[in-house]
Image (spheres, rainbow, N blue to C red):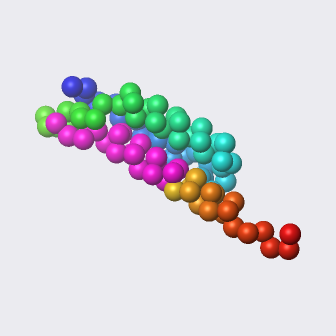
Amino acid sequence: MAHAQHLSTAIDEHGPHLATLSIRELIGTLAGIEDRLRHTPTLVVLGGRLVVNPERRLLLRRQRLVVTALRRRRATLRLPMHGH
């Protein structure tokens, strides 16, 4: 098992706010998160105990936020255009 000695806390939390990103940027962000998830161990040893990797939990949280932002954009694009 991997040891979580140097957890990355930069899970794009300091990047641009999701509402300001384009659909293309959101999809790119999601692809990056999914790539990191594929390479992040599920379990790590912390304090002598085997626990769910905190970095993985942050990545999953960020993934949910990006998917929610993409769904909102889709709903916005489906709204009827008034006056056209």
Vertical comparison of 58 with 81: above or below: above
Task: Confirm whether the magenta stretch covers residue 59.
Answer: yes
Q: Residue at x 51, y 47 (%)?
A: 13
The answer to which of 64 and 77 lies nearer the viewer is: 77
Q: Residue at x 52, y 34 (%)?
A: 32
Q: Total number of numbered labels?
A: 0
Residue 9, located in which quarter of the rendered image? top left
Task: Confirm whether the magenta stretch covers residue 65.
Answer: yes
Q: Residue at x 31, y 42 (%)?
A: 54
State the image coordinates of residue 42 (x, y, percent, origin top left): 28, 35
Helix, strand or loop: magenta stretch: helix
- In the picture provided, is 20 more to the left or to the right than 71? right
Vertical comparison of 75 with 18: above or below: below
- In the picture provided, is 25 more to the left or to the right than 71? right
The answer to which of 73 and 63 lies nearer the viewer is: 73
* Span of residues in magenta: 50-67
Report the quarter where the C terminus lies: bottom right
- In the picture provided, is 53 more to the left or to the right than 78? left
State the image coordinates of residue 78 (x, y, percent, origin top left): 67, 62
Q: Which residue lies most toward the left here?
A: 48
Q: Residue at x 25, y 28 (%)?
A: 3
Report the quarter where the N terminus lies: top left
- In the picture provided, is 14 more to the left or to the right than 50? right
State the image coordinates of residue 36 (x, y, percent, origin top left): 44, 32
